[in-house]
Amino acid sequence: MTESGPKFKIVKFLKIIIGSFLITVLLLFTIASIRTLLLDVNVGLQLAHWEKTKNLSLVIDGHQREELLTNFKGAIRIPTVSFSETEINTTALLEFDRLLRKAFPTVFSSNLVHHELVANYSHLFWVQGSQPGLVPYMLLAHIDVVPATESDGWEAPPFSAQEIDDFIYGRGTIDDKSSVMGILQSLEYLLRKGYAPRRGFYIGFGHDEEVSGYQGAVNIVRLLKQRGVQLAFVLDEGLAVLDGVISGLEGPAALIGISEKGSATVKLSVSMVPGHSSMPPRETSIGILAAAVKRLEENPMPRLFGQGPERGTFEHLAHKINVIPSLAEAYVNLRIHSAQSLQEVLDLIHSTVRDQRVKIELVDGFDPLPISSADEKSFGFQIIKKTVLDMFPTVTVAPGICIGNTDSRHFKDLTSDIYRFAPVWFKPGDAQRFHGINERISKKNYEELVVFYFNLIQNCDIQHLPEAHSSVHEL
């Protein structure tokens, strides 16, 4: 017997409707999948109409290549080391000042550029724009470096700027003299070509960033505040172009840091009556402290967004070998994720240690930095992104979080948008060179830095971002 009548017609109609709906969903899913698989990193503002600024091009010839490498190597050879907040190689900083003036004569003689020393050793440049109504931006970098000795296992002396296989080795090649010299070298070439910016900008070079920047960056900020300066955005060191570093991602990715982790140094101490090792008590100060540290090791900070805060190093102090010390101390350094606060980390330490005999003190610390904008209306982010993609069209550009801290954290009152990025290429294993042995940069990559800043400065000479391409081409 076959089905017939009104009931059959209704069922058939519902089947057609449901089937059509499923086909439509499947079609939309297929289109979305294809768009995802074929996603062009230039989609969005990169396809929009940008204001024509008639950018100058920089094609580095043999003479310029020799010049920029000589300048860069000269900078690496000067040991501008910061050992501590009170121990800085000021003699080297004065030598570095002389190098800058010699290497970039056009910058220091141009009537468009105003230069001043801040706190004796830091540098502040103001490059005047032709349209004062455009909010200025700032390029940051730092002159000082962390200590390095050849006996640590360097393939070349750390202040030799020696070339090995087209790489320049030396402390500061990555952190951060490549940016210092790259910024000024690009400005030197722009000024030689007769360039005059529409949007004015600042350049700041701190001399004590590696020891928190309390003399250099802090005084630069104080000076700018006194002058009522507000900034469209700040670009400092931080993240880089990662090639083969991110598991599962095909091709390189340029990560632009839009925030920094916070930091905290916490002191743990146990104080007891001293005794002799021949008659030890059931629990010693060292044992109690070790147990507290062990609990912290076994219960690390929660992992957020797939990355937990860095665990620091521990150090305990002891006296004569046969004396049980009355005081044992350990210092724990932590990096605080953007989803946490300094107070939350301290609360976690207290709840993890759970021992009233262990005194917990905050030595110093600060909350994570605010998160800068990274959408299609974000002027600074999109200018940096465009500059990267103009040079490296196949690179994926994405926002990221900067694990370390930079001088830019002192500038948060001058702008809501701080970005941490330089187009230094990191391949597997290169990250360990940062503050480690065999720090290096390829000659080609350093030239790319010069070109990057050369283009970035010109790209900032627009009044407004173009309309987002995606807003009129939605699926």
Image (cartoon, grey):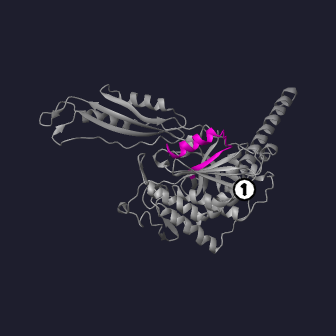
- Left or right: residue 251 versus residue 314 is right
Looking at the picture, how far across and down is residue 215, in whole percent? 50, 44
Looking at the picture, how far across and down is residue 362, in whole percent? 41, 32
Please tell me which residue lies in front, 23 or 34.
34
Q: Residues within 10 Å of mark 1 (few under 14, many from 20)?
A: many
> Looking at this rendering, what residue extends furthest in the top direction?
356
Residue 99, by quadrant, is bottom right
Please tell me which residue lies in front, 232 or 245.
232
Using the rendered image of the protein, determine whether residue 228 is visible from the camera's viewpoint: yes
Does the segment drawn in magenta span residue 373?
A: no
Q: Which residue is mark 1?
A: 458
- Left or right: residue 323 versus residue 380 is left
Identify the residue at horizontal 67%, vertical 64% (top origin): 189
Secondary structure of the residue carrying tag 1 is helix
Looking at the picture, how far across and down is residue 130, in whole percent? 77, 51
Identify the residue at horizontal 65%, vertical 60% (top origin): 109
Looking at the picture, how far across and down is residue 32, in whole percent? 73, 46
Q: Quadrant of the C terminus?
A: top right
Residue span colored magenta? 213-239
> Looking at this rendering, what residue extends furthest in the bottom direction?
62
Identify the residue at horizontal 49%, vertical 57% (top origin): 94
- Left or right: residue 236 versus residue 376 is left
Identify the residue at horizontal 69%, vertical 46% (top origin): 136
Q: Amino acid at mark 1?
A: Gln
Does the segment drawn in magenta span residue 217?
A: yes
Q: Quadrant of the N terminus?
A: top right
